[in-house]
Every structure is written in structure tokens, then in C-alpha cells.
Amino acid sequence: MGRSHIFREKVKYLTGSVATKNPRKWLRDITINRFGLSEAEAELLARKALQYIKGCPSFRESEQIVFPLVEGRDSHSKKYRSTKRVKLTPFCFDDLELYRELDLKSMQTSRILRMIEEAYAQDALFSMDRLSFLTCIEKNALRDRLKPLWSQGIRLPISGIKKSTREGFECFRATRAMRELLSGKKPTAIREDLFLTRSQIEDYRLQLHTAFVQGPEAVTGPPRLGQELYELALEFDVKPETPAISDQPETRTEFIEHLRSGHDFSPLKAKLYVDMLDDYVLEETDENRPPNTITYWAVAADEPAGKSIADCQLVPVSLAYYTKEEQEGYQGRRTRDLKWERLMRFTTQARRDGGLLAQADLAFLLGIHPGVIQKLEKENDNVQLPTRGILNDIGTGLSHIEKIVELYLQGYTESQIKRRTNHSYDAIENYLRTFAAVMVLHERGLPRLMIRKVVGKSMQLVETHLELYEKYKDREGAQLVLMQLRNAFERQNGAEGNFLKT
């Protein structure tokens, strides 16, 4: 029970940390800071604004990429001739619900199924190679995930699968979910069996209602889905529901009027708000965002440790979810190598754009456990990922700071440490300055809590530096190094402790 509770708490922390980086938070914060709304009203308006943005024809959601797949829903020959560029969603924030309530494998499987269905709806098919490439999951493992659903007759076509498997397809996941729901099966069990989020179940309900009231052709999605839902509604004699009247503004004019009448915006203020949304849409179109690129909201690089993620400033960072070079060189490579390449790319690109990604962000983006990231870091210890933990002295990043300081106390030069750890000179000198400050303030008798406040670092970092100090203070070889650090601190801050006043 104890280990299970700890595991669930870690999952809760991970999903909670990532959930705050939803684009809706950015909209909410801007609505509060720039337009002066209360938190509750800003949250409500941010939801409406996000729906308005998603309804714009040219908009590509921040989580979506454009990827070449096998053209044609019936292209099952292994030697396919042409490809087609389709929009895919390799991750979305609803995925966190499955991770939190079920497990990581359920979240991974949900992503696999979603992309297969998205491709099919756009008249394209995944090959196993391309599905493995995007998900970083080996082909055999993918087949193991899909076979149980194929055996149930769920339509999840992959280019090149056996004809007998294709002939066994009976219906889409949406149809199976609605059939089981109408038969009295609990929604929780349906979601667990078919790897569905609550919002997907609600979308399927709406599609079922649309098929019954407006006809099969009114259902958006792949061919046959509307007909399947229509026949299901007739079979169970589904009663048409009175649709709720929506106050969701869809056009620019409607949104401006809604802001004026519903949120008491002035005409100019309403126009400025919608102009801001339209500018965001313009940035996130296929013309302005490369097909392989996603937009992710990362914590700003200058946000200090110890601050709640919910209170941190978020900045949009552009991440190349895949590259042409990766795709061309993927055949025969291990998925773990692909994961490492993406980890390096994501962290460096986020830092370039003024944000820092934590291990929780990287695990969510790639759909892997944080422990996998830690193993890959150990396997590639000659390269240091510039994560928020490393650069802002948080969590597992402390082990690397400790390693750098300890190497210096052992007599290694900064150049030697740079070659060993792949850290910049600025980063190494910053770690040494912090260590020197902690050491001198401790020697002057300041309590640890005050030291933490003065240096502006986490208590965990202060404790780590003091442990190193106690370990090396009486070692003959290290005493000269400690004296040099002490003198450097005095020169920079003055013997009277000017450091304490900054």
C-alpha cells in the first residue's frame, strides 16, 4: 500500500505540473493581467476564447503536427506508391486524465489509437514503421497493443496488415463505446477498455445525437461512422434530445458582441481582445508554423526555484517533434536512441526560446516514464540536458551541480570540468559562486534558512553544498581550493558582507 500510494502521488504531481501548461492558462493569465478580469471570470472567458480559436479554419492546434502517411484508406500493399500529409495529434492535455486515473500504458495506447483514427479520417494510413517512429514504441510492442482491439472488431487499420484482420473489422471505437453505453455498461469501464477520455465519450454522445436527428451525413469523420451511429440509434430507439442552447460565440463579430454584453468590455477593449486571439491564430497556421513543429508552454527561464508552477510565467516555445533527418535514418535504429535525440532537441530548443522544460514536460511530450529519461541521461553522461531541474537547481539536477563542485574541490580545473560535464564556463562559475556564498555565510554563523533566502536558491541546494563543505573542509588537498573560493567571495562582496544587501 505504501509504495502504491507513493507512486500515485508522483503521478499526481507529474500530471498536475504539466496540466498547468495548458494554453488555457496562458489565455487566463493574459485575461487577468491585461484586461483586468477576476480569476473566475477570466477562467470562463479563456475557455470560450480557446473554443473560438479552435473554430478558425486556418488554425492548427499547438499540439498538432503535419506528417506524411500512406495515401488512401485501402492502401494495404506493403509497397505503397504515394504519401499524403495529414494533421496528427501526438499528445494532448486530455491524455493526462488517463495517466492519472489508469496508468502510463493506457495513455500511450490512447495516443496510438487517436493517431490511427485521425489518419483514417483524412484518407491515409499509418505503416508500422511510421507509427513506431512517431510514438518511440517498438513495432512488436505496437502490435501487442493493437491485437486485442483488432480481435474485438474495432476498426484500426494499419497499412500492410493481413486481409483476414481487415475483414474482421466491425465498427469504430465510437460506435462500440456508444453501444456499450446504451447497453448499460458503466462509462468508467468503457473508458478503461477502449482507452477513452471523458471528453471523447461526450463527443461520441453528440455524434450519436447528430446522426439520429440530422442524418448520417451530418457526422464529421471517416466514412461509415455516421451510418454506424445512425443504425445504432435506430436499434436502441434513442430518443432525440433537445440540444442545449450554446452561448459560444463563433464569428469575430459574435465574440466582440459577447465580450461587450456578457463581460462588460468597452468596444475598443473587446476589439483588442479578439485582435489578440486572431494574431495567435495567425501564428499557429500551417503557413507560419513548420509542419514538424509543435508549440508548448514552458516555464520562463528566469523563474526561480521554489515558485509554484501555477504562479510562474509561461512562454511559448517551438519544438520540432520530428526531423527529416531522423525520419530518413530511422530504419534499424533503436527507439531509445530516437528518444534521446528528441530529449536533447526539445530541451535546447525550449531554452533558445526563453523557456525551460522539466522532466515532467519531457515525459509527457514523449509519453514515457521520467525514469526512462534518467536512465538515458546515465547512458549519455557526456552530454547534459539543459532542463529546468539542472539549470534552476531543482530535483535530480542537484546531482550534477554536486558533481561539478566536487570535481573542483578535488582539484580539477574549469576546463577539465567543462570537458567532463559538457557544462558552459558560465554555468560552472555560477555553481562555484553559489557554493562559495553558502560556505562563507555558514562560516559567519547564518542559519540555513537565512542562507537560502540570501542566495535565492532552494533549501535542497543549500543542504547539498553544506554537505560537500563538511566533507572537504578538513581535507588537506581541498583546503587551498576552499581558501581560493573564500577569497573570491570576499573580493566580489566585500569583507563586510555586501552580498547580504543585494
Image (spheres, rainbow, N blue to C red):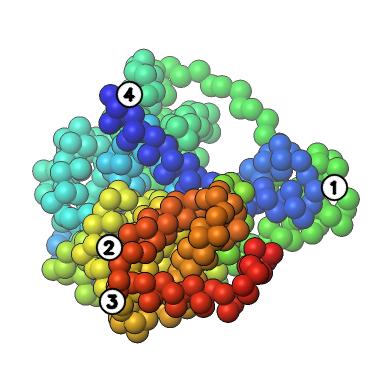
Please give the label number shown on residue 377: 2
Q: Secondary structure at mark 1?
A: loop
In the picture shown, does residue 18 fall above or below 487?
A: above
- Is residue 125 in view? no
Q: Secondary structure at mark 2?
A: helix
Please give the label number shown on residue 420: 3
Tell me the CA gap for discs 4 and 3: 52 Å
Tell me the CA gap for discs 2 and 4: 38 Å
Image position of 281 (left or right of 98): right
Please give the label number shown on residue 189: 4
Which residue type carries mark 1? Phe
Badge 3 crowding class, 10 Å Cα cut-off, few under 14, some 14 to 19, many 20 or more, is: some
Tell me the CA gap for discs 1 and 3: 58 Å
In the picture shown, does residue 137 fall above or below 439?
A: above
Q: Which residue is mark 1?
A: 265
Which residue type carries mark 3? Arg
